[in-house]
Amino acid sequence: MKLNHMSFPSSDVAATATLFAQHLGCTVAARGASWFLKRSGFDIVIDDAAGRPVDWPRNFHIGFELRSLDELRALYERMSGAGVAMKTALFSHERGSRFFCEAPGGVLVEINTRADADAEYRGTFERFDQIDHVDH
């Protein structure tokens, strides 16, 4: 089984979709009340919350993983410089470096790398080779 799509509401669909397109490598496939975004291997559907605030559980988030600490640092700087709502600084963790930001509309996004993770957590990093093989 593979991840097919994720769908979540936003009180600002256009701004949320723009963040995913500008900073997270998504392409916009369709616009309307919901925006459909394409990402390598899965789709993201951002639904209009119809003017209602979205009340996310405190620890709910979606995550993206980068290959290297240099890529992570560069994305952190680019997003910070673009005024994205950063929820943390870039920090080291036993499972790899990461940072959290908030997309317009309120969803929390984690961007990480396992390149500098403790040895016991690096096992899932090799999946990039599988993804590259499937995508090309």
Image: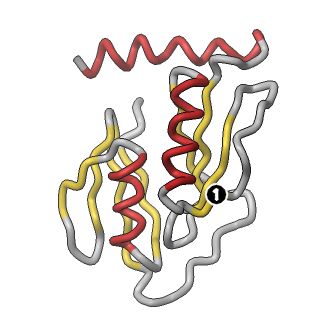
Q: Residue at x 41, y 38 (%)?
A: 3
| Residue 99 falls in image quadrant | top right
Q: Camera-side residue: 5 or 84?
A: 84
Where is residue 111 drawn, in percent x and y? 58, 41
Left or right? Give the position of 10 relative to 124: left
Q: Residues within 10 Å of mark 1 (few under 14, many from 20)?
A: some
Q: Amino acid at mark 1?
A: Met
* Point 67% across, 14% down: residue: 122
Q: Nearer the viewer, residue 36 or 99?
A: 99
Tally the marks.
1
For the C terminus, give its image quadrant.
top left
Extreme residue toward the front, this view: 81
Quarter containing the N terminus: top left
In the depicted structure, whether residue 76 falls above or below residue 96: below
Point out residue 6 in the picture as x, y percentages from the top left corner. 42, 52
- Up the image or down, 81 lies above or below 56; here it is above
Figure coloring? secondary structure
Left or right, 38 with respect to 99, comes to: left
Where residue 133 appears, x then y in whole percent? Answer: 31, 12
Q: Most extreme residue toward the left, as rendered?
A: 30
| 92 up-or-down from 56: above or below | above
Residue 110's x, y, as percent?
61, 46
In percent of the image, x 57 and y 78: which residue is there?
Answer: 54
- Would you name the residue on which mark 1 appears? 86
Q: Secondary structure at mark 1?
A: strand
